Amino acid sequence: MATPRSIVITGAGSGIGRATARRFLAAGWHVAVLGRRDSALRETVQDHPALILPCDVTDHAAVDAAFDAVTAQWGRLDVLFNNAGRGAAPAAPDALDPAEFHAVIAVNVTGMFHCARAAFRVMRAQAPQGGRIINNGSISAHAPRPGSIAYTTSKHAVTGLTRSLSLDGRACGIACGQIDIGNAATGLLTQVSRSAADAAAPPPEPTMDVSVVADAVLHMAGLPEGANVQFLTVMATTMPFIGRG
């Protein structure tokens, strides 16, 4: 019987990360769930065997230690789903607190770099060499919503991270792809969308079930060596993305 493949899922305590972790556990993968709150991670995995990694992705030393724990547990890392992220309340650029902008960048860009860096280190050193990194981008990596300057800036940066990892990973068998998600029904969607209390806000946009995203990530992760989904957009069919921006 083949040894199960291993994956680290960041931001696994809620939303897309939680749904994806449960999907991979159901598929028989070795799953390490990484997030800030131990209790939320345990709620994600329920009674399934999994590696619980309480960790703040903005702390690079803690991230390195978490990935070392993965290799100590399973001997290798096959996939990173680089998913941890946060949004900010909608605001015009001149109304956004600079501290809030920096906080979004710290998680969505710097934190994602810390995790990609740690995974790259492990994947390059292991035998056989290589692995796969899947970054959670966003529709906002292509076109912004109003009042989303921090989140949109961060997700455009994720695309640059994806491209650089793809290029630098070629020599050592590390593939990198990006999933750009539009309106999965999670708490973060509410945070980055217009406030429902805003009388000028349009009607709520169509959403899709978060399980659709989890299935898409499983597909990307399960591709054979030598094949990669570079960019994948998955969204509610009638979401107003085409024509936005």
Image: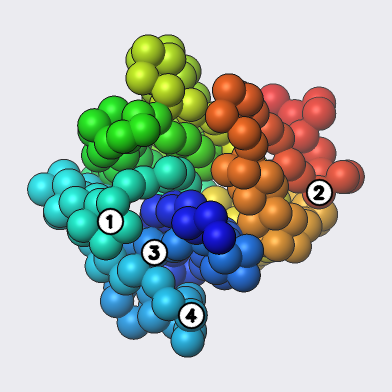
> Mark 2 — residue?
236
Mark 1: few/some/many CA within 10 Å (<14, 14-19, 20+): many
Q: Foreground mark, 3 or 1?
A: 1
Quarter of the image that includes the N terminus: bottom right
Q: Foreground mark, 2 or 4?
A: 4
Most foreground residue, 55 or 143: 55
Which residue type does callout 3 highlight? Val
Q: Residue furthest front?
A: 1
> Mark 1 — residue?
70
> Mark 4 — residue?
48
Q: Residue at x 39, y 80 (%)?
A: 42
Q: Earlier in the sequence, mark 2 or mark 4?
A: 4
Q: Residue 88, how many percent across, how many down?
A: 43, 51
Q: What secondary structure is found at the residue carrying circle 2?
A: loop
Q: What secondary structure is found at the residue carrying circle 4?
A: loop
Q: Residue at x 24, y 31 (%)?
A: 125
Q: What secondary structure is found at the residue carrying circle 3?
A: strand
> Mark 3 — residue?
33
| Residue 208 position (above or below residue 237) | below
Q: Which mark is residue 223?
A: none
Q: Residue furthest left?
A: 61
Q: Earlier in the sequence, mark 3 or mark 1?
A: 3
Q: Earlier in the sequence, mark 1 or mark 2?
A: 1
Q: CA distance from mark 4 to mark 1?
A: 17 Å
Q: CA distance from mark 3 to mark 2?
A: 27 Å
Most foreground residue, 18 or 108: 18
Most foreground residue, 16 or 226: 226
Mark 3: few/some/many CA within 10 Å (<14, 14-19, 20+): many
Please say if the residues under marks 3 and 2 sit with CB atoms less than 8 Å apart: no
